[in-house]
Amino acid sequence: MSNVLLAHALAFYLLSTITGVAHLVTGQDAMRRWAFALLACALGVHAGALAVRAVMMGYEAVATFQDELSFIACIMVGTYVLMAVVLVPRADLTVVGVLVTPLAFLFTLSAYAFNSSTAALPPQLQNVWLPVHVAPAFLGYAIFALAFCLSVIYLLQERQLKAKRKSNLFRRLPSLETLDQLNHRFVSWGFALFTVGIITGTLLAKETWGALWSWQPVELASAITWVLYALLVHARHTGWRGRKAATLTVVSFVVLVVSFLSVNLLFPGKHSGSFD
């Protein structure tokens, strides 16, 4: 059942991407509305698929690498929808959605293609610290992904401004000020959540394996990523704005993605299916 729902979510993500690109190219407002409506449908169906899988499998619903990607994708899209509806309802953020939606499609596709039963988690991992660790950590990942998309758009638009190119597509992009402010908010929120995720992760490790720190690859990668984002938050508070902040946001997210993929694919450990 969850795989059927994921298939429908994938279709909605693909259609949303197509209509979003159509809006950017043609400027037709109907395409913008359709892109957002299709993305909202994708979010609802995707969330339903995750809920069904959670009911069927419990803690194991996000035990695999592919399920983690699917979970992050759903949170990322949900955060984008919230941003578009609540934070800046008057701004046309379709271009952000055009970046977010293909990412969500690819992440969800991995869960759909490799969806399978997983081995039960050890009893010692099935405690209150697991969801308290996973929820803020993954929410932090999703918000960092949105900050990355905003930064990429900022850098592209700034380059267009410097080159004095004012195409029709350029006129449909959010202002540099809006992009910079949103980037600042998302980096700050993502950093706070990521920090909570690390702290609760150490408490989970203490509860499960008897040590707060065991030099696992995921712990080292998380520490490096945390330091980079801490530097970014500090730089923001000391006056960094615009291109510098956007560039460091892109670099930090690239390091985060490389670390996440490396830990899960190249250096399996306690966070990649080997729980002892």
Image (spheres, rainbow, N blue to C red):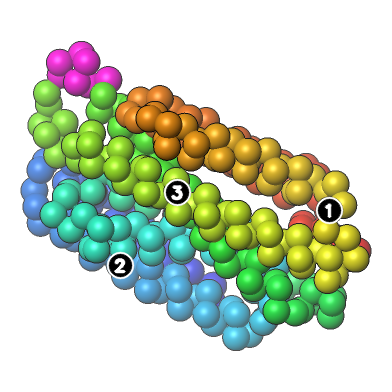
Marks 3 and 1, Cα distance to the nearest angstrom? 25 Å
**SS class, disc 2:** helix
Badge 1 amino acid: Trp
Q: Residue at x 44, y 46 (%)?
A: 187
Judge depth for marks 3 and 2 and give the one in front: 3
Circle nearer the N terminus (2, 1): 2
Q: Earlier in the sequence, mark 3 or mark 2?
A: 2
In the image, farthest residue toward the front: 238
> Residue under circle 1?
213
Say whether residue 106 is left or right of residue 166.
right
Residue at 16% across, 31% down: 170
Answer yes or no: is residue 11 visible. Answer: no
Residue closer to the observer: 203 or 111: 203
Check disc 2 and report the residue beneath it: 40
> Considering the numbered disc 1 on the image, is that residue within a helix, a strand or a loop?
loop
Q: Nearer the viewer, mark 2 or mark 1?
A: 1
Task: Using the rendered image of the protein, determine whether residue 251 is visible from the camera's viewpoint.
Answer: yes
What residue is disc 3 on? 188
Vertical order, 153 against 188 (above or below) = above
Percent x, y of residue 217: 79, 45
Residue 133 % position (x, y): 65, 66
Q: Earlier in the sequence, mark 3 or mark 1?
A: 3
Amino acid marked by disc 2: Ala
- Vertical side of 171 occupied by 226: above or below: below
SS type, badge 3? helix
